[in-house]
Image (tube, rainbow, N blue to C red):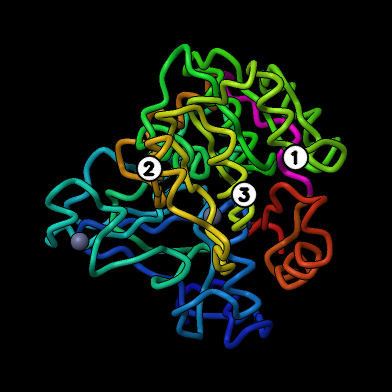
Amino acid sequence: MGKQTLTAVLGAPRRLEIVERDRPTAGPGEVVVQVAATAVCHTDLEIYTGRHPGVRYPVVMGHEATGTVDSAGPGVSGIEPGQRVIINPIIACGRCDSCVRGAENLCRNAGLFGREIEGSLSQYVRLAARYVYPLPANLPLATATLIETLATVRHAQQRVGLGSGESVVVLGQGTTGLLHTRLAVLAGADSVIAVSRSGWKLDMARRMGARYAVNATAQDAVDEVLALTGSRGVGVVIDTTGGATALKAGIDMLRPGGRFCAFAVSHEHASGFSTFPLYYKEVSIVGARALTPGDMAPSIELVASGAVDVTGFITATYPLDRAAAAFEEYERNPGRILRIVIDSQNS
Ligand SMILES: [Zn+2]
Ligand SMILES: [Zn+2]
């Protein structure tokens, strides 16, 4: 009998089963990674509950993952068994027009490891070696799962061209909002205004370096941002909440010539939205999807150096065989959770 692996298979929405399978073996150019930790994000929750459009079940979820290289196939160089790695989950074809332009995140043919391609909610996974990036020894593997999220945040800030001296509003202070706040501070933003409905998240935003923390439950966020900027508005608004009201509020917070980064996505339709402000204020709306390979190494460095301190971001840990309970907790308490980590080696 060959070696086995446990894998969490989502046969249909909310039907997560732990199954025993043959352990994968690395083919040419591939590695097998013994998964250590997978962080669960909103995308996974949408897949779990059946709300994510276009998903074909069964699915093996998990795209924010770290582990240790178990074996490497023929032709793999630079990655060796025993090496601790993080996975870039944007699996691209390398041939389409998007890939040729270097925009692998927009590949027309491939998809996300953990959605279109089987992901990391397993003890062992196989993937092309070019999707794994070595991690420094000092970084705990559970903590390092946040690097994937940080890479998506970095990609968005590159897209919006956030530079030093800018005034920035970050709407929402969940995991991505907090990372946006921190990265904007590190980019040299002049004043970063963090907006959230949650007091404890605003406390974390201050720890990330936000100059102002606006509690949107107690205050009108647009009025407050305008008051803080002498009625001028800010240069950049980054929305991590995804709601249609955030789009309108965000544009109202911008100075003329400002940029709105639509980082989060939502099923909500933006009714009552007029394009007049885009004209009058010459506002740019910038989309951002996932990450590019070039975001990985800088993001590893940002976390490894401590410049981005993600202490406190992991709010719960579950073993692989209790992954379904992790999703249930996430669904019950979305406002209380930053990242839930699934531990693949403790089941
Ligand atoms: Zn994610
Ligand atoms: Zn492609």
**Mark toward the start of the polypeptide (1 vs 2):** 1
Residue at 47 percent across and 18 percent down: it is: 187
Q: Is mark 2 within 8 Å of ligand 1?
A: no
Report if residue 302 lies within the magenta region: no
Residue at 72 percent across and 32 percent down: it is 223
Residue 117 vertical placement versus 17 (above, below) = above
**Which labelled disc corresponds to residue 196?**
1
Q: Position of residue 119 (x, y in %)?
A: 47, 66
Q: Amino acid at mark 1?
A: Ser
x then y, percent, for residue 102? 19, 46
Quadrant of the image containing the C terminus: bottom right
Q: Amino acid under label 2?
A: Tyr
Residue 125 occupies which quadrant of the picture?
bottom left
Q: State whether residue 69 is above or below residue 26.
A: above
As drawn, is 151 to the left or to the right of 238?
left
Q: Dot 2: what SS?
A: helix
Q: Quadrant of residue 303 in the image?
A: top right
Q: x%, y% of residue 169?
A: 60, 30
User: Mark 3 or mark 1, which is nearer the start of the sequence?
Assistant: 1
- Magenta-colored span: 306-315
Q: Which image quarter: residue 133? A: top left
**Left-right relation of 314 to 111:** right
Residue bearing the label numbered 2: 279
Taking 234 as reference, is 295 above or below it? Answer: below
From the viewer's side, name the closer residue of 192 and 231: 231
Viewer-side residue, 45 vs 190: 190
The residue to which callout 3 is attached is 246
Q: Earlier in the sequence, mark 2 or mark 3?
A: 3
1 left or right of 324 in image: left
